[in-house]
Image (tube, rainbow, N blue to C red):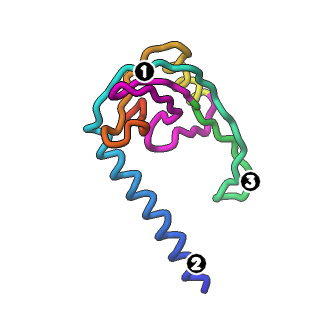
């Protein structure tokens, strides 16, 4: 029973990993439009470490931006397809500095679902 649970968890992780990889590949061909940063900040949280069972602080850059695609206005908070989480606050601050409020940015959006977008392809 224990191995069946491990296999199920592995299958779910693989499924989402493959989905993410496919979306990363597809996004390279997405059209772009101009957007504007509405707000940006760092969100810090404590997570349980898998190595030692302790708790580590993790920092995530959160950005809210607006853009138009095909004549419709959208807003999104998705910076990139992969999570943008950092172990050091300094690294998060470096990324945050790239996205100050009111900055004009290039937005990559899915032409089939323009509400899906990212600011960075990396």
Residue nearest the observer in this picture, 76 or 7: 76
Residue sitting farthest toward the front: 71
Q: Residue at x 43, y 57 (%)?
A: 17
User: What residue does disc 3 label?
Assistant: 54
Q: Residue at x 56, y 82 (%)?
A: 3
Q: Position of residue 103 (x, y in %)?
A: 48, 14
Depicted 34 relative to depicted 78: above or below:
above
State the residue position of label 2. 5
Which class describes the residues within 10 Å of circle 2: few (<14), some (14-19), or many (20+)? few
Residue at image mark 1: 35
The magenta region covers 63-89
Toward the bottom, the furthest residue is 1
**Picture coordinates of residue 80, whole percent (x, y):** 45, 37
Query: Image quarter for residue 6?
Result: bottom right
Residue 56 position in % (x across, y down): 70, 46
Residue 65 image position (x, y, % from top left): 51, 25
Earlier sequence position, callout 1 versus callout 2? 2
Q: Could you say which is closer to the camera, residue 52 or residue 85?
A: 85
Q: Residue at x 33, y 28 (%)?
A: 70
Query: From what the image shows, is residue 49 above or below residue 1?
Result: above
Q: Marks 1/3: CA distance?
A: 40 Å
| Cα gap from disc 2 to disc 3, whole angstroms | 24 Å
What SS does tag 3 mark? loop
Quadrant of the frame with the C terminus? top left
Q: Is-magenta flag for residue 70?
A: yes
Does the stretch in magenta take in 79?
Answer: yes
Label 3 packing within 10 angstroms: few (<14), some (14-19), many (20+): few
Considering the numbered disc 1 on the image, is that residue within a helix, a strand or a loop? strand
Q: Quarter holding the N terminus?
A: bottom right
Say the numbered circle drawn on residue 23.
none
């Amino acid at each position: 029973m224990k191995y069946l649970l491990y296999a199920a968890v592995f299958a779910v992780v693989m499924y989402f990993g493959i989905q993410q990889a496919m979306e990363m590949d597809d996004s390279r061909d997405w059209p772009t439009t101009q957007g504007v940063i509405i707000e940006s900040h760092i969100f810090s949280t404590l997570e349980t470490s898998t190595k030692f069972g302790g708790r580590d602080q993790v920092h995530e850059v959160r950005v809210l931006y607006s853009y138009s695609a095909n004549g419709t206005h959208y807003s999104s908070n998705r910076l990139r397809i992969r999570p943008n989480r950092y172990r050091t606050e300094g690294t998060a601050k470096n990324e945050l500095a790239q996205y100050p409020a009111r900055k004009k940015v290039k937005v990559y959006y899915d032409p089939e679902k323009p509400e899906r977008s990212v600011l960075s392809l990396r």
